[in-house]
Image (cartoon, helix red, strand yellow):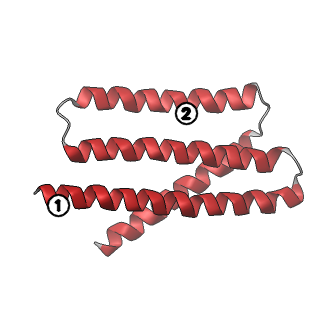
Amino acid sequence: MKVMKMMKIKNKINLFNKISSRSFFAIVLLAAVSSVFDRREFPVAVLLGGIVGILHLKGVSMTADTLVKGVKSKGILWFFSILRLMAVTVILFLLVRDLGVNPLGLLAGLVTVHVFTLAEGWLDAKKQ
């Protein structure tokens, strides 16, 4: 039983590394292509949105690892999940309000990470 749990944790870590590396490559490629059309704001916003998306994915991965390990208190996991979502919201709000980052670029970076998360998760589930 413990071996299966450790294999699941190792598989999730490999899946996180695969998703983050492929989505980072796609984000850099998207920023490079968008720099042809818009010189300043949009490519930087795509990169920032992608970085926030990858950090959010890391938090989700850590929560999933904690659930697989079998934590007794589920209330703490709910609290930290809500705290993580609030932190992402505050970071995105501050980026748009204070730094004047293009919100569509942030959205493009976040969507890119989430699309790769869905695609890699679907492919991983299809294998098993």
| Residue at point 73%, 31% (across, down) | 96
Name the residue beneath numbered marker 1.
4
- Dot 1 amino acid type: Met
Name the residue beneath numbered marker 2.
88
In the rendered structure, the answer to whether residue 17 lies left or right of residue 42 reads left
In the rendered structure, the answer to whether residue 75 lies left or right of residue 58 reads left
x, y percent for residue 81:
39, 33
Marked residue nearer the N-terminal end (2 or 1): 1
Q: CB under 8 Å between callouts 2 and 1? A: no
| Residue at point 87%, 46% (across, down) | 40
Q: Is residue 108 above or below residue 83?
A: below
User: Residue 98 sits in which quadrant?
Assistant: top right
Q: How many marks?
A: 2
| Residue at point 61%, 30% (across, down) | 91
| Residue at point 31%, 59% (across, down) | 10
Q: In the image, which is nearer the foreground, mark 2 or mark 1?
A: 1
